[in-house]
Image: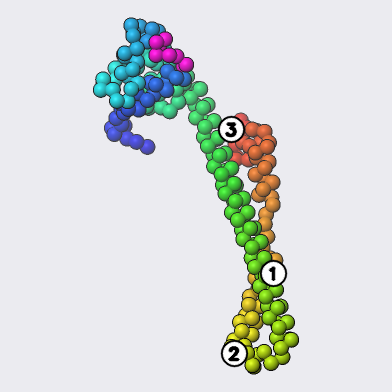
Amino acid sequence: MQKISNFKLNPDLIRKRCLSARLLARKSPERAAKEMGYTNTSMISKMERKTSKTAINHNFLARASLCYGVSMDYLLGMSNYPERDPRSVEQLAIYNSVQHYANQVLENIAETIIKGASAHVLSMHLSMLCDESSNLVDSINRMRELNPKFDEEVRAGATVVDRVDKVSLCIHETRERLSKQTYNDNILRQFKSVLSDSDERQLDFVGYKHGE
């Protein structure tokens, strides 16, 4: 938490909030200036424009708060909620907190699904590689059968045979590992249920209990 003694007003943020508040109230510069008692939009422009050299006018902020229906805390950058009613601010803060947490949960589930999908694709490619390698091993073994003296008469034939045996063993071990690989389909079903069910179900999913 920021120390009170370190807090300083940020003129750029105040100007940005003045503009945001007017847009939230859906009022044109002309209408806002008239309601605040100004004869033209000069003050509106000076308070909203980021490049303005005019110092922040506190009387303007007070009028803007009333005209736009926002809190002074919001205009001064001391609160991120424009509502003036404390209860409304509290409810909005709780809602935003729950929504933020729910979004984090959904992002984590989506990430898990993506990783699971990537692992599944990888296992498919490994299976294809095993199949092709197995075909190659079978072809070489068939060639050896048709050429009984292959191992002795062909240069480096013994080395090729040794490598083929190692590849064959590797294929066997890889297939065993792939057969033990499991994928939890419940994750996908859970993700779909959160997206399709009611808001109440979503709140229950992230641990929000009604009435608390």
- Residue 73 visible from this viewpoint: no
**Residue at label 1?**
131
Q: In the rendered view, tell whether residue 140 sits above or below residue 67.
A: below
Within the image, what quadrant is residue 139 found in? bottom right
Q: Which residue is mark 3?
A: 212
- Say which mark, if any, is on residue 155: 2
Quick check: marks 2 and 1 in contact, CB under 8 Å?
no
Question: Three-letter amino acid code at disc 2?
Answer: Arg
Q: Is residue 104 above or below residue 94?
A: below
* Foreground label between 3 and 1: 1
Report the amino acid beneath label 3.
Glu
Task: Tell me the mark number nearer the camera, choosing from 2 and 1.
Answer: 2
Residue 47, image quadrant: top left
Distance Cα–Cα, label 2 vs label 3 = 81 Å
Q: Position of residue 126 (x, y in %)?
A: 64, 65
Quick check: 148 left or right of 11? Answer: right
